[in-house]
Amino acid sequence: MIDHATQQQAIVRLFDLVRNGDVDNLEFSQLDSLIYGALEQTYQVTDAGNDQHMVRTTAL
């Protein structure tokens, strides 16, 4: 798991890449995987079939 500051920097950089249309490169893929992995750890993720993931959330 990465620290909060690094996670924030990764999210900002990922947003910048998407905003600029730079989504077909290694940096985007690595940041996307990093953020998605953090989301999988934070939320309960299950396979929904057809190679898709579904995030199950609950309201407290």
Image (cartoon, rainbow, N blue to C red):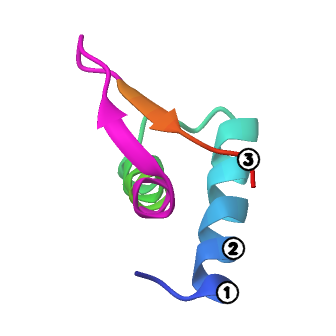
Separation of marks 2 and 3 at Cα, in angstroms: 24 Å
Identified at 62% across, 53% down, the residue is 14
Q: Residue 49 placed where, x, y %?
A: 24, 15
Separation of marks 1 and 3 at Cα, in angstroms: 26 Å
Identified at 63% across, 84% down, the residue is 4
Query: What amino acid is at disc 2?
Result: Gln
Q: Residue furthest front?
A: 60
Crowd rating for badge 2 (residues with CA inside 10 Å; few <14, some 14–19, many 20+):
few
Task: Tell me the quarter of the picture where residue 30 sits.
Answer: bottom left
Asked if labels 1 and 2 touch by Cβ distance under 8 angstroms, the answer is yes
Relative horizontal placement of residue 51, taking residue 6 as reference (left or right): left
Tell which circle, 2 or 3, labels the residue nearer the N-terminal end: 2
Query: What amino acid is at disc 3?
Result: Ala
Please tell me whether mark 1 sits on a helix, a strand or a loop.
Answer: helix
Crowd rating for badge 3 (residues with CA inside 10 Å; few <14, some 14–19, many 20+):
few
Numbered circle sitting on residue 44: none
Tell me if residue 7 is in the magenta stretch: no
Identified at 60% across, 68% down, the residue is 10
Q: Which residues are magenta?
A: 38-52
Tell which circle, 1 or 3, labels the residue nearer the N-terminal end: 1
Crowd rating for badge 1 (residues with CA inside 10 Å; few <14, some 14–19, many 20+):
few
| Residue where numbered disc 3 is placed | 59
| Residue where numbered disc 2 is placed | 8
Q: Residue 60 placed where, x, y %?
A: 75, 55
Q: Is residue 30 above or below residue 24?
A: below
Q: Is residue 30 above or below residue 57?
A: below
Identified at 23% across, 19% down, the residue is 51
Please tell me whether mark 2 sits on a helix, a strand or a loop.
Answer: helix
| Residue where numbered disc 1 is placed | 5
Query: What amino acid is at disc 1?
Result: Ala
